[in-house]
């Protein structure tokens, strides 16, 4: 049993070898000290902090852990989330010396009325909710203990509540005709990660609007969520982040489903902020593009599986062709998309089309 800490590292800077070591400095940063106190108060013995538990200099081990972040955060008994501030130099409000913002209250005819801040808004407007890596950390966790500047918020798979009130609200989806405005204002995280294959577009659309310090993290910071869709009851596969095996019958060959998935369309709201290609990623996957607001999968995909007119092969690191079925079997064993090159070969019929305007 262990706790995990989710926080914003802070502004990236040049790091020495000592900075990248796994040694916990003495004294430890205030956030780390407070997280340890919180872990001990919860009667847990271990605390996972990626900054100190992932050796940034051991490339192979680092990539292996990054490919399995879903196991880490889902395996944690609780995830301590610092949504109050950025960096490790500021502690958790209410744990040690960092004070919280006083709540407004008044008395009316002997009754005390307290203004309850909307925890959902406080969390969603925080720097923590703007970073790319923290998206999967919050979504994958079974229990989140979130520290804001006003109060503590808690949400697990069954219920959610905040420090100001004693009521427990269900975290599970409810029928549309059942209205509970207070619960809606409080619930910060959706229920479940991959409840159905169609959820992937919503997860991607939320993630792509977050910030990454390094463009090379575009896929890694979302890998835990992709793993969950892959392991769901209705498996949704991916190739370099591009999801496939969705909205199509199971009788359709996997290579046809992958070719259909290439028809995704980017959504982009701001004409002044043009799409920019990331290096090292294939242009046919959404992970290659900055300034997306989401992706759109048109139902025209459903009309393209009438025959085996297109042959798709994935290329290995040595340009060896790999069938899509073999790729899926290999990923089931190793979960390492980086052992495949970001290149595809498509073989099919071509035709010329003229437009008269």
Image (spheres, helix red, strand yellow):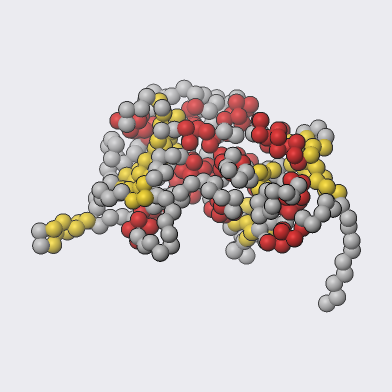
Q: Position of residue 90 (x, y in %)?
A: 37, 38
Residue 140 vertical position relative to residue 108 in the rendered view, above or below = above
As drawn, is 34 to the left or to the right of 321? left
Q: Give whichever of 309, 61 is nearer the camera.
A: 309
Count of numbered marks: 0
Residue farthest to the left, as pictured? 110
Residue 104 vertical position relative to residue 141 in the rendered view, above or below = below
State the residue at coordinates (89%, 63%): 352
Q: Position of residue 229 (x, y in %)?
A: 59, 44
Residue 42 vertical position relative to residue 226 in the rendered view, above or below = above
As drawn, is 15 to the left or to the right of 323? left
Residue 254 vertical position relative to residue 304 in the rendered view, above or below = above
Say whether residue 76 is visible.
Answer: yes
Residue farthest to the bottom, as pictured? 357
Q: Give whichever of 13, 132 is nearer the camera.
A: 132
State the residue at coordinates (48%, 36%): 74
Say whether residue 29 is visible.
Answer: no
- In which image quadrant can residue 265 be found? bottom right
Q: Quadrant of the N terminus?
A: top left
Q: Give whichever of 175, 220 is nearer the camera.
A: 175
As drawn, is 59 to the left or to the right of 178? right
Q: Position of residue 40 (x, y in %)?
A: 32, 28
Q: Position of residue 180 (x, y in %)?
A: 35, 60
Residue farthest to the front, as pictured? 251
State the residue at coordinates (77%, 58%): 304
- In which image quadrant can residue 45 be found? top left
Q: Give whichever of 339, 199 is nearer the camera.
A: 199
């Amino acid at each position: 049993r262990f706790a995990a800490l989710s926080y914003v590292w802070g502004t990236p800077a040049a790091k020495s070898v000592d900075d990248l070591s796994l040694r916990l400095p003495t004294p430890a940063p205030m956030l780390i000290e407070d997280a340890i106190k919180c872990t001990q108060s919860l009667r847990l013995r271990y605390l996972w902090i990626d900054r100190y538990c992932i050796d940034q200099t051991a490339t192979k081990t680092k990539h292996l852990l990054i490919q399995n972040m879903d196991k880490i955060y889902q395996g944690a008994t609780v995830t301590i989330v610092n949504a109050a501030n950025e960096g490790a130099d500021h502690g958790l409000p209410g744990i040690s010396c960092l004070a919280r913002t006083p709540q407004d209250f008044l008395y009316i005819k002997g009754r005390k009325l307290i203004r309850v801040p909307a925890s959902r808004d406080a969390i969603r407007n925080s720097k923590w909710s703007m970073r790319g890596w923290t998206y999967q950390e919050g979504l994958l966790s079974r229990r989140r203990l979130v520290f804001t500047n006003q109060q503590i918020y808690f949400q697990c798979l069954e219920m959610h509540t905040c420090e100001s009130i004693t009521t427990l609200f269900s975290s599970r989806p409810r029928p549309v005709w059942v209205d509970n405005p207070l619960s809606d204002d409080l619930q910060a995280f959706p229920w479940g990660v991959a409840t159905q294959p169609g959820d992937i577009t919503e997860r991607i659309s939320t993630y792509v609007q977050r910030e990454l310090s390094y463009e090379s993290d575009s896929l890694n910071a979302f890998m835990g969520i992709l793993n969950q869709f892959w392991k769901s009851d209705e498996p949704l596969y991916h190739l370099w982040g591009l999801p496939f095996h969705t909205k199509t019958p199971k009788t359709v060959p996997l290579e046809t489903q992958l070719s259909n998935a290439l028809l995704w369309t980017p959504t982009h709201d701001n004409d002044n902020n043009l799409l920019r290609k990331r290096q090292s990623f294939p242009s046919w996957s959404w992970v290659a593009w900055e300034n997306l607001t989401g992706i759109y999968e048109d139902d025209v995909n459903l009309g393209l599986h009438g025959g085996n007119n297109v042959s798709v092969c994935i290329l290995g690191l040595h340009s060896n062709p790999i069938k899509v079925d073999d790729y899926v079997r290999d990923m089931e064993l190793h979960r390492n998309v980086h052992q495949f090159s970001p290149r595809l070969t498509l073989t099919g019929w071509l035709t010329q089309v003229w437009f008269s305007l």
